[in-house]
Every structure is written in structure tokens, then in C-alpha cells.
Image: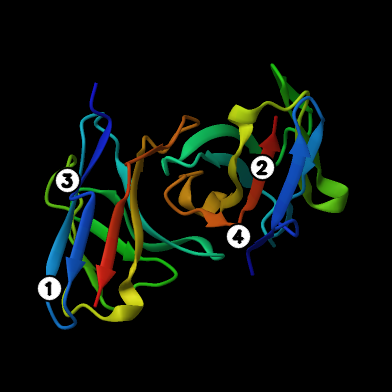
Amino acid sequence: NAGVTQTPKFQVLKTGQSMTLQCAQDMNHEYMSWYRQDPGMGLRLIHYSVGAGITDQGEVPNGYNVSRSTTEDFPLRLLSAAPSQTSVYFCASETGGNTEAFFGQGTRLTVV
Amino acid sequence: AQKVTQAQTEISVVEKEDVTLDCVYETRDTTYYLFWYKQPPSGELVFLIRRNSFDEQNEISGRYSWNFQKSTSSFNFTITASQVVDSAVYFCALSEAQYGGSQGNLIFGKGTKLSVKP
């Protein structure tokens, strides 16, 4: 019963490096999304997807790319990491109906 | 524009006290959804409740209760007889119906950190 799985749990990057945060869900949910959590800011939506092949921007999309080639996976790409992207990243999925949303355990990213 | 305000940044209570966490929201939609999430010190996000804008009935679940008042745009959360395990950051969030009620497009408040001392 995996739910939403995020990898890695921790990551340190140097400024300018690129990387991909992985998110996978095994619940056949159509809706998936990425949030970032910064101290005192709550969670802010980066990108979301309403189904395979469909993505859109959220509140803070700059510096991030996403794609949704399958229902199960929704990776988040940092093209050129900046210290401002130091944050905790959460992936979420849900069916889109009147049901519970599921969040991954989070990825703590530090950019130095 | 959508906005969620949790004016209480931190609250500290002694075990067995009742505590209310405030949430005020702004939206121009007539159909929307409100949520509460709990984030314990371990960091995961735990879904607590979802309420749609047409259902103003208060809800009780064990020691937890929620008071939804459209007239004041508030969705407050009360913990009765608090316990140390209730210590966490609590987030209120809003989603508008244009996304079909998807929880993938949540506007979060900044959270209230609750500390329950023994």
C-alpha cells in the first residue's frame, strides 16, 4: 500500500545543477500536483496535472518543469538550481472527486 | 482573488485545554471547498476534513470539530481536551470549483503551530 512515493527524501545541490524530483502514485489518481513549503509561507502550488499528457502552472512555476507521460508518474525538474529553490517539496494526488488527497513524504532540497 | 488567512501563527496550551484554530478565506466563487491538514513534527501532511460551500453543517469527529460560517467566511477548527499528540502545524486550505473540486489546486494558509504541553 505505497500511496504517493517521493524520491529522494533529501538532496543537496550546487547552484546551477539540474535534477529531477520523482513522484509516483499507485492509486490510479488522475490529479497530481507539486507544492513547495517554505518557513512561514504555507504550501504554494508549483505545477499540476489533471491527467496524463496535461499539465499547467500553479502559483510559483518559474525554474521548474513538469511532464505527465503516465498516470502514475509526475516528475518535477529543476533546470538550473538556485538557492531560492531551497525548500521542502511535496507531491500530491487525488481522484478529483469528493475524496481524500494524498501527499508524499516530502523532499527536502538544499541548494548551496 | 483567493486567499486564506490563519492569523494565529503559534498557539501554546496545556494538555486537556480546548483550543480553536481560526481560518478566514476569500473567494469570488459561489462553489468552493475548504480543507484542514495536519503536519506533525515528522513532516508528513495528514488530511483532516473537506467541506464544500453548500454544506454549512458543523462537523464533529471525536475530539475535533469544525465550524463553517459563510457569513463571516470562516472555517474554524476546535480541538477539545487537547493532547500532546495534537502538537503540529495545522493548515487551512481553499480550492475553487473551476478545477472540479480538485485538491490539486489548493491555496493554503500559512499555518498555525500548535504546541500542547503536558
Relative placement, left or right, of B12 versus A34 is right
Image coordinates of residue A57 in percent, x first then y, are 35, 68
Q: Badge 2 is on which residue? A: B115
Q: How many marks?
A: 4
Q: Let me know if marks 3 and 1 both belong to one chain.
A: yes
The residue nearer to you, when weighing A93 against A37, is A37
Relative placement, left or right, of A19 versus A45 is left
Q: Let me know if marks 2 and 4 both belong to one chain.
A: yes
Image coordinates of residue A61 in percent, x first then y, are 34, 72
Of badges 2 and 4, nearer the viewer stands 2
Q: Numbered disc 3: what chain?
A: A
Instruction: Give the spatial CA distance, label 4 vs label 1.
Output: 29 Å
Q: Residue furthest front?
A: B118
Residue ID at (77%, 23%): B81
Q: Badge 3 is on which residue? A: A73
Q: Let me know if marks 4 and 1 both belong to one chain.
A: no
Residue ID at (55%, 39%): B38
Identify the image quadrant of the N terminus of chain A. top left
- Would you say residue A77 is visible in this rendering? no
Q: Which mark is residue A18?
A: 1
